[in-house]
Each structure stands twice: as C-alpha cells, then as structure tokens.
Amino acid sequence: MAEYGEWNRKGATLSDVTAQKEYGVSRDFIIQGINAGKLEFREGAIWGNPYLRILRRQLEACMSEELGPEHVSSVKAQTELRQIKKEINELKKKLQLLQLRKAELEKSQGLAVKRRR
C-alpha cells in the first residue's frame, strides 16, 4: 500500500513510458506487476493519450524481486550518470556564454578607460 501522501510527493511517481526509458522495463512487465497486486497505479491522460502512473518505490521493489537487486542498482547508477553528464554539458554551455560576455565587458571597459585619458 502507498504511504500517506506518496502519490503527491515529487519524484515518487512516474508514468509507464518514463519507467520504460528510465528502468528499461516493458509495459508488459508493469501490467504483470499490476495484475499480481505488486504495483498500485492510477490512470491518466495527456492530450488524449492514456498512460499509467505508478509508484517508483513499488516498481523498484518489484524489479529487485523479479530481476535481482543488482539490476536495479545498475539501472539507477546508469540513470544518475546520464543526469550528471547532462548537467555538466549544460554548465559547460553556460560557462562559455559567461566567458564571452566577460570578454565583451572587459573590451568595452578597456575602450572606456582609454577615452577618459
């Protein structure tokens, strides 16, 4: 059973499509977990496209039971690594923009100092 407020907690739920991308499980695996009573779900729809919303904690427990705990930890590590790489790339782009802006400001400051003399 879901804990009190778990359905509303940020990051506690995910859609079946996100579970497929993040954990590499099939929709059939999720349906089997629901039919076995291991996964609670809620139905939703975005722009007329139906999806299943499931609890992350229950999915991980079901995966470790079916596929082994090392599979879950491996998948979680891969997901975290992917997020870290994405964040590093975003920070690199932001740093490049800041360095360009800094060079522009220094150049304009250099011209302003020369004009005062």
Image (cartoon, rainbow, N blue to C red):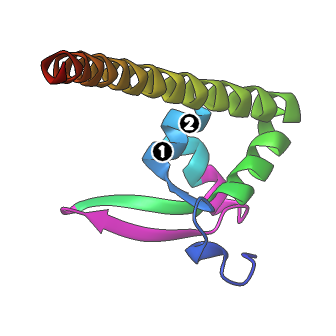
* Image coords of residue 100 (percent x, y): 29, 18
Can residue 26 be seen here? The reply is: no
Q: Are marks 1 and 2 in contact (CB under 8 Å)?
A: yes
Q: Is residue 18 highlighted in magenta?
A: no
Q: Residue at x 47, y 27 (%)?
A: 91
Asked if the magenta segment contains residue 35, the reply would be yes
Depth order, front residue of 32/20: 20
Which element is circle 2 on? helix
Going by the picture, which residue comes out furthest to the left? 115
- Quarter occupied by the C terminus: top left
Q: Which residue is mark 1?
A: 18
Q: Position of residue 8 (x, y in %)?
A: 56, 76
- Which type of secondary structure does the marked residue at label 1 adopt? helix
The residue that disc 2 covers is: 22
Examine the rendered structure and indicate whether residue 32 appears above or below residue 12. above
Closer to us: 36 or 96: 96
